[in-house]
Image (tube, rainbow, N blue to C red):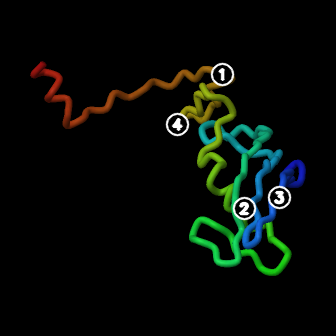
Amino acid sequence: MTKPISFEGVLKKGDDFVEVNGKINLEYTTACHLCGTEFKRNDTIDVFETYRREPTEDEYKLVGDEIELDEMIFDNLRLNLPVRFLCKEDCKGVCTKCGKNLNFEKCECVEEIKSSPFDVLKDRM
């Protein structure tokens, strides 16, 4: 993390519930899934959650007059952050033979043409 995770929002209290409506903001450094280049990301996640004394499976437990935001924030991070991070949408990755980052330089490796059991179908068309 380059900055601490922050949450800004509004709480609406009812008789047996508290609604949390806000945004989770985070800034962090991660590595590209394809080329390994480190880069900085800023993400904002919209949150609308409910806390109740008798919660359903989609709600959080309200205990006394306090609510714990930690679990709700981490759940929303896990559900909304990408599984794979790319430094840019058109990242070319690295050459699997020589390891050069194809975003910055071209390699001279020759691509092998592999045979496939489906090659037989090409002749039938």
* Residue matched to label 4: 96
Q: Is there a contact, CB below 8 Å, between mark 1 and mark 2?
A: no
Q: Which residue is mark 3?
A: 11
The disc label shown at residue 74, or none:
2
Question: Which residue type does callout 3 highlight?
Answer: Leu
Label 1 to label 2: alpha-carbon separation: 39 Å
Secondary structure beneath disc 4?
A: loop
Q: Which residue is mark 1?
A: 105
Image quadrant holding the C terminus, namely top left
Tell us which disc is closer to us: 4 or 2.
2
Q: Are marks 4 and 2 in contact (CB under 8 Å)?
A: no
Residue 83 to residue 70: above or below: above
Q: Residues within 10 Å of mark 3 (few under 14, many from 20)?
A: few
Inter-mark Cα distance, 4 to 3: 51 Å
Q: Crowdedness of circle 4 by 10 Å Cα count: few (<14), some, many (20+)?
A: few
Do the CB atoms of the residues marked 4 and 3 lie less than 8 Å apart?
no
Which is more N-terminal, label 2 or label 1?
A: 2
**With respect to residue 4, does 100 lie above or below?**
above
**As shown in the figure, which amino acid type bears the numbered disc 2?**
Phe
Q: Residues within 10 Å of mark 1 (few under 14, many from 20)?
A: few
User: Closer to the N terminus: mark 1 or mark 4?
Assistant: 4
| Quarter of the view holding residue 99 | top right
Q: Amino acid at mark 4?
A: Thr
Query: Measuring 65% from the left and 57% from the top, which residue is drawn there?
Result: 78
Q: CA distance from mark 1 to mark 3?
A: 52 Å
